[in-house]
Amino acid sequence: MRPLRVGRETLERNLVLAPMAGVTNLPFRLIAAQAGAALVFTETVSAKGLSRQGPKSWRLVESAPAEQPLAYQLFGAETGPLGEATRMLAGRGARFIDLNLGCPVKKFLKHGAGACLLRTPQSVGPLVAAMRRSLPDGVLSVKVRLGWDAHSITAPEVARIAEAEGADFVSVHGRTRAQLYRGRADRARIAEVVDAVRVPVLANGDIVTPQDALDMLRQTGAAGVMIGRGALRRPWIFSQIVELDGGRPVPEPAPAERAELVERHLELMLRYFGDQRSAVHMLKKYLCAYAVGLRGASAFRERVNRADDLERVVADATSFFRSAE
């Protein structure tokens, strides 16, 4: 682990929380930042939604001082909205803005955005250039997959184009769009992207233990790691990686520590979402993820997913995590 220079900014360490739709909202970003992530990402937000002043889009980019530094991830396939959304975010103090070039879900693809752009690498250049003009002093990045499928591995080319148009770093998920989340992230292919550009590359995919992170860095030559689903299950993974890298033991959190995390997360959820119904609905996703690997987790998940009453969910969760092994 080491500090990471990206553009004009230096991150405290080379550990980053990946953008995840429906996951990396403000409460979870605060949890991850407190756990040791040096940079956290918003959920992916529509450039058109922001440029048109859509309330739902702007809700996704609400932030707090405690989560800084914060990166905003945009999706879109048109220079106008991407440039305007970047300008608007920069005007509100954004220092890190990212372009999504890898999301495989249909909502993105039907607009020609996300992983669709990997099929036409030359289309990426004007998009990055438009964002760069709107963010002259901040850090601009792109997040890619390896390509559309195994027959079109375009990530190295896309990374070179993004770099040429002013991107300060590149994040690579080691799967194609066709794979979705099946199979294993291809570290050799990630290494090809590392070799293709001079800017820092962050490696992403299948980092679920502290050792996975160190292995990823060693095997790819990447400048840092970006952690997604592994952090959803165990946000404390960031501090564990630091400990392991320093040669120190990395015990799992004690039951009382997990319970305190749940209570802290609930407090943040209530503060952010404002009403108990929304908070309990959103909290279930995280509770079920935190329970993975613990004895009695299946029965706990069934109870939590059936419950609608906030007090019941919190009492059950507190009791479960304080006694779990």
Image (cartoon, rainbow, N blue to C red):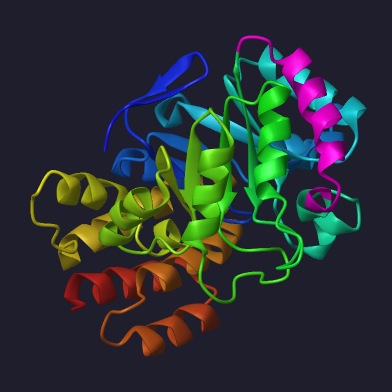
Q: Which of 172 and 197 is in front in this view?
A: 197
Q: Residue at x 75, y 23 (%)?
A: 86
Does residue 242 belong to the magenta stretch?
no
Q: In this view, does 95 lie to the left or right of 228?
A: right
**Residue 238 image position (x, y, % from top left):** 31, 48
- Asked if residue 179 shows in the view, the reply is yes
Q: Residue at x 40, y 40 (%)?
A: 224
Does residue 135 belong to the magenta stretch?
yes
Q: Residue at x 49, y 50 (%)?
A: 191
Q: Nearer the viewer, residue 128 or 84?
A: 128
**Residue 312 image position (x, y, % from top left):** 41, 73
Q: Quadrant of the C terminus?
A: bottom left
Residue interval drawn in magenta: 117-137
Q: Quadrant of residue 315?
A: bottom left
Which residue is at the far left?
Answer: 248
Q: Is residue 24 left or right of residue 219?
A: right
Q: Quadrant of residue 132?
A: top right
Q: In this view, does 159 lie to the left or right of 56?
A: left
Q: Which of 304 and 250 is in front in this view?
A: 250
Q: Is residue 64 left or right of residue 245?
A: right
Q: Residue at x 44, y 82 (%)?
A: 301
Up/down of 222 relative to 260, above or below: above
**Residue 23 image position (x, y, % from top left):** 56, 55
**Residue 239 image position (x, y, % from top left):** 24, 46
